[in-house]
Amino acid sequence: MPKFIDFHPGFQIAPERVAQIRQDAVDGRSDQYGVRQLELYYSPDGKGVYCVLEAPDESAVRNHHNGNCNEVIRVESLL
């Protein structure tokens, strides 16, 4: 399945939400759009959040975020 990265500038994420996302990633859960969180990089001081996702396509990523994301980039990885 394709992988994507997106960025949410100025977004602060609550510790409880980070814990839930972490558990969903560990459990391999996908949402109703077929999107699965692979990794999340966040700034504790609210400068932004990067999401690394596995998804069928860019549209699924945007739906996953309710349209609230900037550029969505399809990426490849070494591993």
Image (tube, helix red, strand yellow):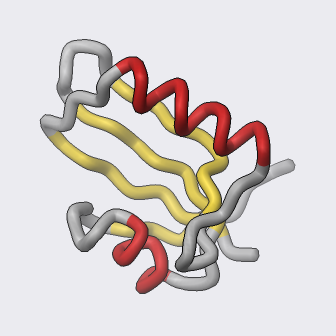
Q: Tell me what residue is drawn at x 30 percent, y 29 percent.
A: 13
Asked where in the image residue 33 lies, by quadrant, the reply is bottom right
Residue 56 percent across, percent down from the top left? 63, 82
- How many labels were placed on the picture? 0
Q: Tell me what residue is drawn at x 28 percent, y 70 percent.
A: 66
Q: Is residue 76 left or right of residue 32?
A: right
Spot the residue most to the right: 79
Residue 61 percent across, percent down from the top left? 45, 72
Asked where in the image residue 59 lies, by quadrant, the reply is bottom left
Residue 70 percent across, percent down from the top left? 23, 63
Please say if 68 is above or below 39.
Answer: below
Give whichever of 70, 78 is nearer the camera: 70
Q: Is residue 3 left or right of residue 5?
A: right
Picture quarter with the N terminus: bottom right
Q: Is residue 28 left or right of residue 12?
A: right
Q: Tell me what residue is drawn at x 48 percent, y 80 percent.
A: 60
Spot the residue most to the left: 10
Residue 63 percent across, percent down from the top left? 37, 77
Give whichever of 74, 8 is nearer the camera: 8
Q: Tell me what residue is drawn at x 19 percent, y 23 percent.
A: 46
Asked where in the image residue 43 lies, by quadrant, the reply is top left
Give whichever of 53, 20 is nearer the camera: 20
